Amino acid sequence: MSKYTIYGDDAFDRKIDSLLGIVVERVVDTVGRKNLVALALGGGYGRGEGGVFLNTNGEMSLYNDFDFFVITSDISRMQQWRLNRALLNLSPELSEIAGIDVDFSPVKNISDLKSSKFTMMWQELKSGHVVIYGPENIFEQLPAFDLNNMPHEELAKLMLNRGTGLLLAKQRMEKSQLKDEDVDFIARNIWKAVMACGDSYLAMRHTYSYSYKRRSELFDAYKDVQEVSDFYPWYKASIEFKLKPVMPAKGELPAMWNQAKEFFARFYLYVFNVCLDAQGMNFAQIQKAFYQHPPFAKNETMQQMLKNFIINMLEVGPAKFNLNLFFKYPRTRLFIVLPSILFDNEATRDYILLLPGISISGSGDEILKSYLKLWNRFN
């Protein structure tokens, strides 16, 4: 039985073990043994459900990403910032060696584990991971939040990020000639968006699991429910693509993207209506509600609001001063703007003006560039 995948074998595990040895060596060199407490592999491979891609000759290769989590001794914020920069610079080198993207989460001090707030990423890490350096029980210190009672903001962030993935896939599809890596990128983001739809549906019904296979099984209970019956085979296919991807033909991509967008619009409305404790709101109404009374900013302290103001002044600029939003975290702006770009026929286009440097006459490329710059910073 494979340690890192469902469809792999012992030889595939040995390949991963060898790569992880290289990662440990390079991270120790970068962070220093004095500062490094633990290094863990999370994501699909850390949970034993990593992707296995079969080449045309039947050989197995890695798919998806390596997601690493770095736990440090109690170092200063400045030291954390420097290490994050160093690990960001290390990622391309390790990605080239591994043949897949190698990502590092922001470093976290060991003393901060016990006070960590709920995030989907860290709770899934607690549920399934492989410690490759340091104490095996390091994440017992993380609070045991219930994935079946996930904060609505976590689901909103999931939909925001996967909706942005659809935008990026569409941008890539518009190239005159698609290479194999373009097909891979487009297909991957289409299936990620589909999976997010099903994941959010399960989470809203308090039946979510950190395991891809288990989520696929849980979704069987809803296959005959009218609102998701047509979506059911797509969700099942998204899980299988995650575990054992098969690339579609180039000519299939536009139809796949359009169907994924249609499903995504349905579940996006569902999730954000729940976030607003509402029913039947359309995209324009959801945008207006987030603009007037952002639901995730209700309990922010005065200190947080002042910090948000400074961030907005620096990242958005005084020319876009807005009393409603300048005391809110910039992600609020992304929640409002995404429908204007992705669902432009149904959402309020005027909210595009909330983007830095964008005027009413801004081109589509300028709008997307401004949005992605903000998203990369605050997603």
Image (tube, helix red, strand yellow):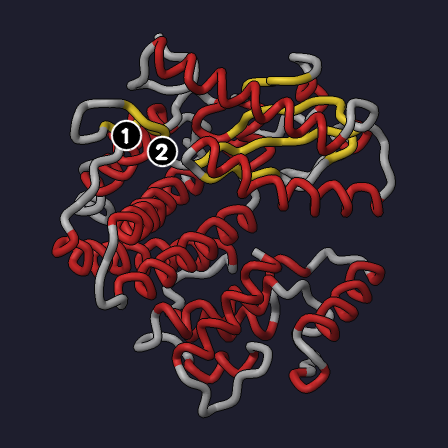
Residue 203, by quadrant, is top left
Q: Which residue is mark 1?
A: 53
Residue 212 in the figure: left or right of residue 325: left
Residue extending furthest bottom? 361
User: Observer-nearest residue: 136 or 133?
Assistant: 133
Vertical side of 130 occupied by 83: above or below: below
Residue 294 makes an appearance in the image: yes
> Horizontal and vertical percent for residue 192?
35, 45
Describe the element under mark 1 as helix, strand or loop.
strand
Residue 374 in the figure: left or right of residue 366: right
Q: Residue at x 69, y 66 (%)?
A: 328
Vertical side of 256 occupied by 65: above or below: above
Residue 123, by quadrant, is top right
Q: Residue at x 70, y 16 (%)?
A: 134
Tag 1: residue type?
Phe
> How far apart are the alpha carbons under marks 2 and 1?
6 Å
> Horizontal and vertical percent for residue 118?
63, 38
Is tag 2's residue or tag 1's residue first in the polypeptide sequence? 1
User: Observer-nearest residue: 235 or 95?
Assistant: 95
User: Observer-nearest residue: 300 or 132?
Assistant: 132
> Horizontal and vertical percent for residue 249?
14, 48
Mark number for residue 63? 2
Asked if labels 1 and 2 touch by Cβ distance under 8 angstroms, the answer is yes
Instruction: Look at the image and tell me in which quarter the C terminus lies.
Output: bottom right
Residue 200, by quadrant, is top left
Circle 2 Cα neighbour tier, 10 Å, few/some/many (<14 / 14–19 / ≥20):
many
Describe the element under mark 2 as helix, strand or loop.
strand
Residue 93 in the figure: left or right of residue 48: right
